[in-house]
Amino acid sequence: MVPRKPADVPPVELMDEFGGSLFGGTRPKKVEEPKGFRGWLAKTEQRVIAWPWKRIGQGAMAVAVMAGGYALWTNRVFVGDFTAAYVAEATGAVVEKIVVSGAVYTGREDLQSALGLKRGDSLVGFDAGSARARIEQLPWVRLASVDRMLPDRVNVTIYEHVPLARLVADGQIWVINKDGKRIVADASNAFAGLPLLKGDGAAAQAGPLFMHLANWPQLLTQLREAEWVGDRRWNLRFVSGVMVQLPEDSRTFGAEQALPLLAKLEEARHVLTLNAGEVDLRLPDRVVLRLPETVGTTPVTQKPAVAG
């Protein structure tokens, strides 16, 4: 049943038994009092009987109001829930559909728990801002938005961290993003296809490395491990077992300049298919190949033309 609007309810003035309105108003005109013995008797009866009970009644009413107010205050959650449920039923503001977009790695149960809503719940009193804040505390969620679409729909949009690589740190393997943020621990090896990073400071340096590698997908798709060495440069290990030593970044030569050379060597000589060989790109004027079948080194004094 839909509650009646205040305008639909006729105004009613409640009067007490002593001729006064409970909430204000005027008293009726005073009736002329009887005279003589009858008048004296009436006054005495009024003093002895009516007056004390009137005061007691007013006091009892005040106590009742205070007690009722205290009960409502101490049980405010119950009263609030009851009111919300009543209004929701009356207006039809009950959840029928929750639409989620952007969730790839975030679990359904975790998301629903953070949202605090399920089908059939009331939308009255639902705090979308608080729900958004809870959702953004989930490990994979970077940003989120929660919008109520009355009468019965809630839209949830989340923007997740993009997994970049795995990081060996603190005795665990972590999934990290481009900023080196640890997203979740990969205890189940669910992200085994991502490159594995090692070395102190590797997480902080991962972003620039993968930014350069993104220009050379033929290298990135074959990368298996990357080790940050001496807090200054990278050693890359590819799926074939080949290790590539990148140079320390300087003003004129670094990983950004060395990776195009590696891409050209792979195209011209297939160096990444060497069985556990090494490609040394640390020197600005030469490339050194170390083959596993030989003890010595095979220097390449003339660099190949830059790929692309």
Image (spheres, rainbow, N blue to C red):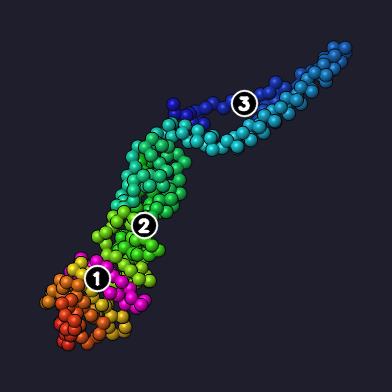
Whichever of callouts 3 and 2 sits on the residue coming sooner in the sequence is 3
Please say whether residue 221 is one of the residues in the magenta stretch.
Answer: yes
The numbered dot on residue 13 is 3
Which residue lies under the disc numbered 2?
Answer: 184
Residue shown at 70% from the left, 30% from the top: 63
Residue 300, image x, y percentages: 16, 85
Magenta extent: 218-235
Q: Is residue 59 visible?
A: yes
Looking at the picture, which amino acid does disc 1 mark? Arg
From the viewer's side, name the closer residue of 158 and 270. 270
- Residue at the spot 38% in from the left edge and 47% down from the top edge: 110
Q: Of residues 42 and 97, which is closer to you in this image?
A: 97
Tell me if residue 80 comes above or below residue 289 in the rendering. Answer: above
Q: Residues within 10 Å of mark 1 (few under 14, many from 20)?
A: many
Q: Which residue is mark 1?
A: 237
x and y percentages locating residue 70 in the rendered image:
64, 35
